[in-house]
Image (tube, helix red, strand yellow):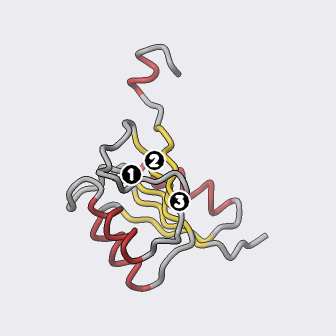
Amino acid sequence: MRNSLKILIADRNRHVRNLLHREFAAAGYQVRVAKTGQEVLSICNEEAPDLFILDSELPFLAELEVLKRLRERYPRIPVVIHSFTTPEDGGLIDAESILFVEKRGYGAIKDGGG
């Protein structure tokens, strides 16, 4: 079943991008991917998604600069920040429209968390 919800996934790691793309597309969502902050902004110039899934450490823009620009242009579009650490957001992250999801990886396994 095709869902009309458009998701933009932006992550610096191609394996994460590919995994999230595959899973959301299999669930019927329309998915676009970006590997840099510049690509996120470029894709949004073409067509804004209904949901952003962002790595907080995207290359080519200062940390969370992408989020700041997206919040200015698209304040109502929900954002999921998918990262290893909670970002220092300078007041950008609010509980109503932004969700933080922690990545689990080598550090979590090494520390017994995963």
Q: Is residue 45 above or below residue 76?
A: below
* Residue type at numbered disc 3: Ser
Q: Which sits in the foreground, 70 or 6?
A: 70
* Residue type at numbered disc 1: Asp
Q: Is residue 80 above or below residue 66?
A: above
Expressed as whole percent of the image width and height from the top left, the position of residue 49 reads 52, 74
Label at residue 86: none
Label at residue 55: 1
Q: Is residue 32 above or below residue 81?
A: below
Q: Are marks 3 and 2 in contact (CB under 8 Å)?
A: no
Whole-Å distance between the Cαs marked 3 and 1?
Answer: 16 Å
Whole-Å distance between the Cαs marked 1 and 2?
Answer: 5 Å
Residue located at (38% from left, 51% from top):
55
Judging by the rendered image, the residue that carries numbered circle 3 is 97
Choose mark 3 or mark 1, whichever is in front.
3
Label at residue 82: 2
Q: Are marks 3 and 1 in contact (CB under 8 Å)?
A: no
Expressed as whole percent of the image width and height from the top left, the position of residue 22 reads 58, 57
Residue located at (79% from left, 69% from top):
1
Residue located at (36% from left, 73% from top):
72
Comes first in the chain, label 3 or label 1: 1
Q: Is residue 87 above or below residue 39?
A: above
* Residue type at numbered disc 2: His
Whole-Å distance between the Cαs marked 3 and 2?
Answer: 14 Å
